[in-house]
Image (cartoon, grey):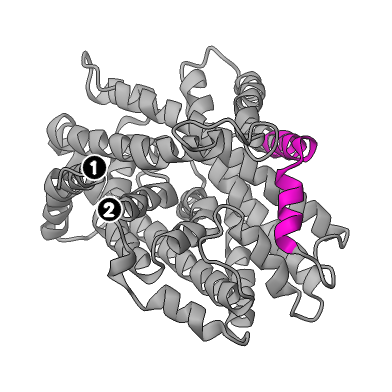
Amino acid sequence: MNREQWSSKLGFIMSSAGAAIGLGAIWKFPYVAGMNGGAAFFLVFILFTVLIGLPLLISEFVIGRGAKKEAITAYKVLAPGSQWNVVGKIGVLGCFLLLSFYSVVGGWVLIYTAQSLVGGVIKEGANYPEMFGAVTGSPAMTLLGLALFLFINVLVISLGIRNGIEKASKYMMPLLFVFFLILVVRSLTLDGAMVGIEFFLQPDFSKLTGEGILYALGQSFFALAVGFSCMVTYSSYLGKDVSIPGAASSVVIMNIFVSLLAGLAIFPAVFAFGMEPAEGPGLLFMILPTVFGQIPFGEVFLSLFLLLFLFATLTSSFSLLEIIVSAFTESGKRRRKNVTWVSGVIMFVAGIPAALSMSTLSDFTIYGKTVFDATDYLVSNILLPLGSLLIALFIIYRMDRKLVEEQFYLSTSLSPVWFQLWRVAMKWVVPITIIIVYVNLLGII
Protein backbone atom coordinates (compact mmCIF):
# COMPACT_ATOMS: atom_id res chain seq x y z
CA MET A 1 0.00 0.00 0.00
CA ASN A 2 1.38 3.44 -1.01
CA ARG A 3 1.36 5.79 1.96
CA GLU A 4 0.40 9.43 1.67
CA GLN A 5 3.12 12.07 2.06
CA TRP A 6 3.15 15.75 2.90
CA SER A 7 3.20 17.69 -0.35
CA SER A 8 5.91 20.11 0.82
CA LYS A 9 8.36 21.00 3.58
CA LEU A 10 6.22 24.03 4.46
CA GLY A 11 3.14 21.84 4.71
CA PHE A 12 4.90 19.49 7.13
CA ILE A 13 6.32 22.29 9.31
CA MET A 14 3.01 24.17 9.43
CA SER A 15 1.13 20.96 10.27
CA SER A 16 3.65 20.00 12.94
CA ALA A 17 3.57 23.54 14.34
CA GLY A 18 -0.20 23.39 14.26
CA ALA A 19 -0.10 20.17 16.24
CA ALA A 20 2.17 21.84 18.80
CA ILE A 21 0.72 25.36 18.81
CA GLY A 22 -2.80 25.19 20.13
CA LEU A 23 -4.26 24.67 23.55
CA GLY A 24 -0.80 23.88 24.94
CA ALA A 25 0.68 27.29 24.14
CA ILE A 26 -2.39 29.51 23.99
CA TRP A 27 -4.82 28.08 26.55
CA LYS A 28 -2.87 25.96 28.99
CA PHE A 29 0.43 27.85 29.26
CA PRO A 30 -0.96 31.14 30.65
CA TYR A 31 -2.99 29.57 33.46
CA VAL A 32 -0.34 26.96 34.41
CA ALA A 33 2.30 29.71 34.48
CA GLY A 34 -0.07 31.88 36.49
CA MET A 35 -0.48 29.12 39.08
CA ASN A 36 3.28 28.48 39.34
CA GLY A 37 5.03 31.80 39.69
CA GLY A 38 4.87 33.40 36.23
CA ALA A 39 8.37 34.38 35.05
CA ALA A 40 10.21 31.64 36.99
CA PHE A 41 7.93 29.02 35.45
CA PHE A 42 8.41 30.54 31.97
CA LEU A 43 12.22 30.35 32.22
CA VAL A 44 12.15 26.73 33.40
CA PHE A 45 9.68 25.95 30.61
CA ILE A 46 12.02 27.44 27.98
CA LEU A 47 14.96 25.50 29.44
CA PHE A 48 13.03 22.22 29.32
CA THR A 49 11.74 22.97 25.81
CA VAL A 50 15.21 23.58 24.36
CA LEU A 51 17.21 20.97 26.29
CA ILE A 52 14.57 18.23 26.37
CA GLY A 53 11.64 19.07 24.09
CA LEU A 54 13.77 19.80 21.00
CA PRO A 55 15.91 16.62 21.23
CA LEU A 56 12.74 14.57 21.80
CA LEU A 57 10.99 16.17 18.83
CA ILE A 58 14.00 15.36 16.64
CA SER A 59 13.90 11.78 17.98
CA GLU A 60 10.23 11.30 17.10
CA PHE A 61 10.86 12.69 13.61
CA VAL A 62 13.81 10.28 13.19
CA ILE A 63 11.76 7.28 14.35
CA GLY A 64 8.79 8.16 12.16
CA ARG A 65 10.64 8.82 8.92
CA GLY A 66 13.05 5.99 9.60
CA ALA A 67 10.23 3.45 9.90
CA LYS A 68 7.70 5.03 7.50
CA LYS A 69 5.00 3.64 9.78
CA GLU A 70 2.58 4.98 12.38
CA ALA A 71 3.43 4.91 16.08
CA ILE A 72 2.77 1.30 17.07
CA THR A 73 4.05 -0.33 13.87
CA ALA A 74 7.11 1.95 13.74
CA TYR A 75 8.58 0.41 16.89
CA LYS A 76 7.82 -3.09 15.57
CA VAL A 77 9.67 -2.35 12.34
CA LEU A 78 12.67 -0.75 14.02
CA ALA A 79 12.91 -3.31 16.83
CA PRO A 80 11.49 -6.59 15.48
CA GLY A 81 10.84 -9.37 17.95
CA SER A 82 10.91 -7.01 20.94
CA GLN A 83 8.22 -5.43 23.12
CA TRP A 84 9.20 -1.85 22.30
CA ASN A 85 5.88 -1.34 20.52
CA VAL A 86 4.54 -0.72 24.03
CA VAL A 87 5.88 2.83 23.56
CA GLY A 88 3.50 3.31 20.64
CA LYS A 89 0.66 1.76 22.61
CA ILE A 90 1.27 4.16 25.49
CA GLY A 91 1.19 6.94 22.91
CA VAL A 92 -2.16 5.85 21.48
CA LEU A 93 -3.63 5.47 24.99
CA GLY A 94 -2.23 8.85 26.02
CA CYS A 95 -3.63 10.55 22.94
CA PHE A 96 -7.00 8.97 23.64
CA LEU A 97 -7.04 10.29 27.22
CA LEU A 98 -5.68 13.67 26.17
CA LEU A 99 -8.26 14.08 23.44
CA SER A 100 -11.03 13.13 25.89
CA PHE A 101 -10.52 16.36 27.86
CA TYR A 102 -8.86 18.44 25.12
CA SER A 103 -12.06 18.16 23.08
CA VAL A 104 -14.01 19.56 26.01
CA VAL A 105 -11.92 22.75 25.91
CA GLY A 106 -12.25 22.73 22.12
CA GLY A 107 -16.00 22.68 22.66
CA TRP A 108 -15.74 25.74 24.92
CA VAL A 109 -13.80 27.56 22.18
CA LEU A 110 -16.40 26.53 19.62
CA ILE A 111 -19.27 27.80 21.79
CA TYR A 112 -17.52 31.11 22.46
CA THR A 113 -16.77 31.48 18.74
CA ALA A 114 -20.40 30.91 17.83
CA GLN A 115 -21.59 33.37 20.50
CA SER A 116 -19.09 35.98 19.32
CA LEU A 117 -20.20 35.69 15.70
CA VAL A 118 -23.73 36.67 16.72
CA GLY A 119 -22.49 39.43 19.04
CA GLY A 120 -23.21 37.58 22.25
CA VAL A 121 -19.91 37.74 24.13
CA ILE A 122 -18.81 41.36 24.60
CA LYS A 123 -21.48 43.19 26.58
CA GLU A 124 -21.37 46.39 28.60
CA GLY A 125 -21.12 45.62 32.29
CA ALA A 126 -20.88 41.88 31.64
CA ASN A 127 -19.42 39.59 34.28
CA TYR A 128 -17.18 37.39 32.14
CA PRO A 129 -16.29 34.87 34.87
CA GLU A 130 -20.02 34.29 35.34
CA MET A 131 -20.49 33.94 31.58
CA PHE A 132 -17.73 31.33 31.47
CA GLY A 133 -19.30 29.52 34.42
CA ALA A 134 -22.63 29.51 32.61
CA VAL A 135 -21.04 27.75 29.63
CA THR A 136 -19.01 25.17 31.55
CA GLY A 137 -21.79 24.64 34.09
CA SER A 138 -24.35 23.72 31.43
CA PRO A 139 -24.36 20.00 30.61
CA ALA A 140 -26.24 20.63 27.37
CA MET A 141 -23.82 23.30 26.11
CA THR A 142 -20.65 21.41 27.04
CA LEU A 143 -21.86 18.17 25.47
CA LEU A 144 -23.00 19.99 22.33
CA GLY A 145 -19.63 21.74 22.08
CA LEU A 146 -17.82 18.42 22.59
CA ALA A 147 -19.89 16.74 19.86
CA LEU A 148 -19.42 19.55 17.32
CA PHE A 149 -15.68 19.83 17.98
CA LEU A 150 -15.17 16.10 17.45
CA PHE A 151 -17.39 16.22 14.36
CA ILE A 152 -15.06 18.77 12.74
CA ASN A 153 -12.06 16.61 13.66
CA VAL A 154 -13.66 13.56 12.09
CA LEU A 155 -14.44 15.41 8.86
CA VAL A 156 -10.86 16.63 8.40
CA ILE A 157 -9.07 13.42 9.44
CA SER A 158 -11.30 11.36 7.16
CA LEU A 159 -9.97 13.41 4.20
CA GLY A 160 -6.39 12.31 4.84
CA ILE A 161 -3.05 14.08 5.18
CA ARG A 162 -2.79 16.39 2.17
CA ASN A 163 -6.43 17.26 1.62
CA GLY A 164 -7.30 17.47 5.30
CA ILE A 165 -4.59 18.31 7.82
CA GLU A 166 -2.06 19.99 5.52
CA LYS A 167 -4.50 22.23 3.66
CA ALA A 168 -5.92 23.59 6.88
CA SER A 169 -2.56 24.15 8.58
CA LYS A 170 -0.67 25.68 5.68
CA TYR A 171 -2.75 28.83 5.32
CA MET A 172 -4.33 29.51 8.69
CA MET A 173 -1.37 29.26 11.09
CA PRO A 174 0.31 32.49 9.87
CA LEU A 175 -2.96 34.36 10.37
CA LEU A 176 -3.07 33.24 13.98
CA PHE A 177 0.23 35.06 14.62
CA VAL A 178 -1.12 38.28 13.10
CA PHE A 179 -4.20 38.43 15.31
CA PHE A 180 -2.25 37.34 18.35
CA LEU A 181 0.07 40.32 17.85
CA ILE A 182 -2.97 42.64 17.72
CA LEU A 183 -4.15 41.27 21.05
CA VAL A 184 -0.69 41.67 22.60
CA VAL A 185 -0.38 45.30 21.49
CA ARG A 186 -3.75 46.17 23.02
CA SER A 187 -3.05 44.29 26.24
CA LEU A 188 0.32 46.04 26.73
CA THR A 189 -1.28 49.48 26.42
CA LEU A 190 -3.83 48.91 29.20
CA ASP A 191 -3.53 50.90 32.43
CA GLY A 192 -1.82 48.72 35.05
CA ALA A 193 -0.34 46.39 32.44
CA MET A 194 3.19 46.82 33.82
CA VAL A 195 2.40 44.74 36.92
CA GLY A 196 1.44 41.84 34.66
CA ILE A 197 4.59 42.26 32.57
CA GLU A 198 6.72 42.11 35.74
CA PHE A 199 4.86 39.00 36.90
CA PHE A 200 5.56 37.29 33.57
CA LEU A 201 9.11 38.51 32.87
CA GLN A 202 10.65 39.16 36.31
CA PRO A 203 11.49 35.77 37.90
CA ASP A 204 10.81 35.00 41.56
CA PHE A 205 12.09 31.47 42.07
CA SER A 206 10.75 31.37 45.64
CA LYS A 207 7.30 30.88 44.11
CA LEU A 208 8.38 27.84 42.09
CA THR A 209 7.80 24.49 43.81
CA GLY A 210 8.86 20.98 42.90
CA GLU A 211 5.36 20.39 41.57
CA GLY A 212 5.69 23.59 39.52
CA ILE A 213 8.88 22.28 37.95
CA LEU A 214 7.09 19.05 37.07
CA TYR A 215 4.31 21.12 35.50
CA ALA A 216 6.95 23.03 33.46
CA LEU A 217 8.38 19.73 32.26
CA GLY A 218 4.93 18.40 31.41
CA GLN A 219 4.06 21.67 29.67
CA SER A 220 7.17 21.44 27.48
CA PHE A 221 5.99 17.98 26.35
CA PHE A 222 2.33 19.02 26.04
CA ALA A 223 3.15 22.17 24.07
CA LEU A 224 5.38 20.34 21.56
CA ALA A 225 3.13 17.28 21.27
CA VAL A 226 6.06 14.98 22.15
CA GLY A 227 6.03 11.90 24.36
CA PHE A 228 3.01 10.21 22.80
CA SER A 229 4.59 9.52 19.39
CA CYS A 230 2.16 11.87 17.61
CA MET A 231 5.14 13.27 15.74
CA VAL A 232 6.28 9.73 14.92
CA THR A 233 3.05 9.36 12.98
CA TYR A 234 3.29 12.81 11.37
CA SER A 235 6.92 12.29 10.28
CA SER A 236 6.10 8.86 8.85
CA TYR A 237 4.51 10.81 5.96
CA LEU A 238 7.69 12.89 5.52
CA GLY A 239 9.86 12.83 2.41
CA LYS A 240 13.67 12.80 2.27
CA ASP A 241 13.96 16.44 1.20
CA VAL A 242 13.33 17.84 4.69
CA SER A 243 15.99 18.46 7.33
CA ILE A 244 14.72 16.94 10.57
CA PRO A 245 16.82 19.16 12.91
CA GLY A 246 15.79 22.23 10.92
CA ALA A 247 12.09 21.37 10.93
CA ALA A 248 12.14 20.53 14.65
CA SER A 249 13.94 23.79 15.48
CA SER A 250 11.35 25.77 13.52
CA VAL A 251 8.52 24.15 15.46
CA VAL A 252 10.23 24.81 18.82
CA ILE A 253 10.98 28.47 18.01
CA MET A 254 7.39 29.10 16.91
CA ASN A 255 6.10 27.36 20.03
CA ILE A 256 8.20 29.42 22.45
CA PHE A 257 7.26 32.59 20.56
CA VAL A 258 3.55 31.82 20.84
CA SER A 259 3.93 31.03 24.54
CA LEU A 260 5.61 34.43 24.96
CA LEU A 261 2.77 36.11 23.06
CA ALA A 262 0.21 34.27 25.19
CA GLY A 263 1.84 35.50 28.38
CA LEU A 264 2.12 39.09 27.11
CA ALA A 265 -1.49 39.02 25.97
CA ILE A 266 -2.95 37.54 29.13
CA PHE A 267 -1.00 38.63 32.23
CA PRO A 268 -1.00 42.42 31.64
CA ALA A 269 -4.77 42.20 31.15
CA VAL A 270 -5.18 39.96 34.21
CA PHE A 271 -3.58 42.53 36.49
CA ALA A 272 -5.07 45.53 34.68
CA PHE A 273 -8.58 44.28 35.39
CA GLY A 274 -7.89 43.04 38.91
CA MET A 275 -8.12 39.32 38.21
CA GLU A 276 -6.01 36.54 39.66
CA PRO A 277 -3.29 34.97 37.47
CA ALA A 278 -4.11 31.58 39.06
CA GLU A 279 -7.71 31.58 37.77
CA GLY A 280 -7.21 28.12 36.25
CA PRO A 281 -8.50 26.64 32.96
CA GLY A 282 -11.00 29.46 32.43
CA LEU A 283 -8.40 32.24 32.44
CA LEU A 284 -8.31 32.77 28.68
CA PHE A 285 -12.10 32.77 28.31
CA MET A 286 -12.48 35.48 30.94
CA ILE A 287 -9.65 37.72 29.74
CA LEU A 288 -10.16 37.73 25.95
CA PRO A 289 -13.62 39.37 26.01
CA THR A 290 -12.39 41.94 28.55
CA VAL A 291 -9.39 42.96 26.42
CA PHE A 292 -11.26 43.06 23.11
CA GLY A 293 -14.03 44.99 24.79
CA GLN A 294 -11.56 47.91 25.04
CA ILE A 295 -10.92 47.97 21.27
CA PRO A 296 -13.10 49.71 18.66
CA PHE A 297 -15.01 46.99 16.76
CA GLY A 298 -13.91 44.64 19.54
CA GLU A 299 -16.60 42.05 18.78
CA VAL A 300 -15.30 41.75 15.21
CA PHE A 301 -11.71 41.28 16.35
CA LEU A 302 -12.79 38.83 19.05
CA SER A 303 -14.71 36.79 16.46
CA LEU A 304 -11.71 36.68 14.14
CA PHE A 305 -9.33 35.74 16.93
CA LEU A 306 -11.66 33.05 18.30
CA LEU A 307 -12.02 31.60 14.81
CA LEU A 308 -8.25 31.38 14.50
CA PHE A 309 -7.89 30.13 18.07
CA LEU A 310 -10.45 27.46 17.20
CA PHE A 311 -8.34 26.54 14.18
CA ALA A 312 -5.18 26.28 16.33
CA THR A 313 -7.11 24.11 18.75
CA LEU A 314 -8.28 21.89 15.93
CA THR A 315 -4.83 21.48 14.35
CA SER A 316 -3.57 20.19 17.70
CA SER A 317 -6.46 17.79 18.07
CA PHE A 318 -5.95 16.55 14.50
CA SER A 319 -2.60 15.05 15.54
CA LEU A 320 -4.22 13.29 18.51
CA LEU A 321 -6.99 11.75 16.44
CA GLU A 322 -4.60 10.94 13.58
CA ILE A 323 -2.37 8.75 15.75
CA ILE A 324 -5.44 6.80 16.90
CA VAL A 325 -6.89 6.41 13.40
CA SER A 326 -3.56 5.56 11.74
CA ALA A 327 -2.94 2.81 14.31
CA PHE A 328 -6.03 0.98 13.00
CA THR A 329 -5.65 1.74 9.28
CA GLU A 330 -1.93 1.04 8.71
CA SER A 331 -2.57 -2.51 7.47
CA GLY A 332 -4.90 -1.22 4.77
CA LYS A 333 -7.63 -3.66 5.81
CA ARG A 334 -9.82 -0.93 7.31
CA ARG A 335 -11.05 2.17 5.50
CA ARG A 336 -9.87 5.49 6.96
CA LYS A 337 -13.34 7.05 6.87
CA ASN A 338 -14.98 4.17 8.74
CA VAL A 339 -12.28 4.06 11.42
CA THR A 340 -12.38 7.84 11.83
CA TRP A 341 -16.14 7.96 12.38
CA VAL A 342 -16.09 5.08 14.85
CA SER A 343 -13.20 6.72 16.70
CA GLY A 344 -15.12 9.98 16.85
CA VAL A 345 -18.14 8.32 18.46
CA ILE A 346 -15.96 6.50 21.01
CA MET A 347 -14.13 9.75 21.82
CA PHE A 348 -17.42 11.51 22.45
CA VAL A 349 -18.49 8.88 24.97
CA ALA A 350 -15.06 8.97 26.63
CA GLY A 351 -15.19 12.77 26.86
CA ILE A 352 -18.55 12.95 28.67
CA PRO A 353 -17.13 12.67 32.25
CA ALA A 354 -14.64 15.49 31.63
CA ALA A 355 -17.33 17.59 29.95
CA LEU A 356 -19.57 17.29 33.02
CA SER A 357 -16.75 17.94 35.52
CA MET A 358 -17.92 21.50 36.15
CA SER A 359 -21.62 20.68 36.29
CA THR A 360 -23.26 17.31 36.98
CA LEU A 361 -20.04 15.60 38.10
CA SER A 362 -18.50 18.59 39.91
CA ASP A 363 -18.70 16.79 43.28
CA PHE A 364 -17.07 13.62 41.94
CA THR A 365 -13.32 13.75 42.57
CA ILE A 366 -10.28 11.50 42.12
CA TYR A 367 -7.62 12.26 44.74
CA GLY A 368 -9.20 15.65 45.22
CA LYS A 369 -9.37 16.46 41.50
CA THR A 370 -12.31 16.54 39.12
CA VAL A 371 -12.30 14.06 36.23
CA PHE A 372 -11.13 16.88 33.94
CA ASP A 373 -8.23 17.91 36.20
CA ALA A 374 -7.29 14.32 37.11
CA THR A 375 -7.09 13.31 33.44
CA ASP A 376 -5.04 16.42 32.65
CA TYR A 377 -2.65 15.64 35.52
CA LEU A 378 -2.29 11.97 34.52
CA VAL A 379 -1.57 12.84 30.90
CA SER A 380 0.66 15.91 31.31
CA ASN A 381 2.64 14.97 34.41
CA ILE A 382 2.86 11.17 34.31
CA LEU A 383 2.21 9.60 30.91
CA LEU A 384 3.90 12.27 28.77
CA PRO A 385 7.19 12.22 30.73
CA LEU A 386 7.03 8.40 30.87
CA GLY A 387 6.55 8.19 27.11
CA SER A 388 9.39 10.65 26.59
CA LEU A 389 11.70 8.62 28.83
CA LEU A 390 10.95 5.44 26.89
CA ILE A 391 11.52 7.19 23.55
CA ALA A 392 14.94 8.38 24.79
CA LEU A 393 15.90 4.86 25.83
CA PHE A 394 14.64 3.41 22.55
CA ILE A 395 16.50 5.72 20.18
CA ILE A 396 19.79 5.40 22.11
CA TYR A 397 19.83 1.72 23.06
CA ARG A 398 17.58 -0.07 20.56
CA MET A 399 17.30 1.76 17.24
CA ASP A 400 20.05 1.10 14.68
CA ARG A 401 22.59 3.93 14.97
CA LYS A 402 23.37 3.98 11.24
CA LEU A 403 19.69 4.54 10.45
CA VAL A 404 19.50 7.24 13.12
CA GLU A 405 22.49 9.09 11.63
CA GLU A 406 21.11 8.71 8.12
CA GLN A 407 17.79 10.30 9.10
CA PHE A 408 19.45 13.03 11.16
CA TYR A 409 21.74 14.16 8.33
CA LEU A 410 19.30 13.89 5.40
CA SER A 411 18.95 17.25 3.60
CA THR A 412 21.16 19.05 6.12
CA SER A 413 24.76 20.26 6.19
CA LEU A 414 25.15 20.22 9.98
CA SER A 415 28.56 19.31 11.38
CA PRO A 416 28.98 16.05 13.33
CA VAL A 417 29.16 17.99 16.61
CA TRP A 418 25.41 18.67 16.47
CA PHE A 419 24.64 14.98 16.17
CA GLN A 420 26.88 14.25 19.15
CA LEU A 421 25.24 16.99 21.22
CA TRP A 422 21.82 15.60 20.38
CA ARG A 423 22.96 12.08 21.34
CA VAL A 424 24.29 13.36 24.67
CA ALA A 425 21.00 15.10 25.35
CA MET A 426 18.99 11.96 24.59
CA LYS A 427 21.35 9.65 26.53
CA TRP A 428 21.88 11.76 29.64
CA VAL A 429 20.02 15.07 29.86
CA VAL A 430 16.53 13.87 28.96
CA PRO A 431 16.31 10.71 31.12
CA ILE A 432 18.17 12.17 34.12
CA THR A 433 16.05 15.33 34.14
CA ILE A 434 12.81 13.38 33.99
CA ILE A 435 13.92 11.07 36.80
CA ILE A 436 15.12 13.95 39.02
CA VAL A 437 11.86 15.84 38.64
CA TYR A 438 9.86 12.72 39.49
CA VAL A 439 11.99 11.99 42.55
CA ASN A 440 11.63 15.60 43.68
CA LEU A 441 7.86 15.37 43.32
CA LEU A 442 7.84 12.33 45.60
CA GLY A 443 9.72 14.35 48.23
CA ILE A 444 12.79 12.10 48.25
CA ILE A 445 15.13 14.99 47.43
Compared with residue 284, is residue 214 higher up or lower down, i.e. above or below? above
Nearest the camera: 414 or 125?
Answer: 125
Query: Can residue 227 be seen at all in this image of the molecule?
Result: no
Contact, mark 2 vs mark 1 (Cβ under 8 Å): no
Nearest the camera: 308 or 33?
Answer: 33
Mark identifier at residue 438: 1
Q: Residues within 10 Å of mark 2 (few under 14, many from 20)?
A: some
Q: Which residue is mark 2?
A: 210
Main structural element of the magenta stretch: helix, strand or loop? helix
Quadrant of residue 306 within the rendered picture: bottom right
| Amino acid at the residue labelled 2 | Gly
Task: Please provide percent x and percent y for residue 399.
Answer: 18, 31
Which residues lie in the magenta part? 128-152
Task: Please provide percent x and percent y for residue 363.
Answer: 61, 34
Query: Can residue 269 be seen at all in this image of the molecule?
Result: yes
Compared with residue 179, is residue 372 higher up or lower down, i.e. above or below? above
Residue visible at 46% across and 70% down?
260
Nearest the camera: 12 or 208?
Answer: 208
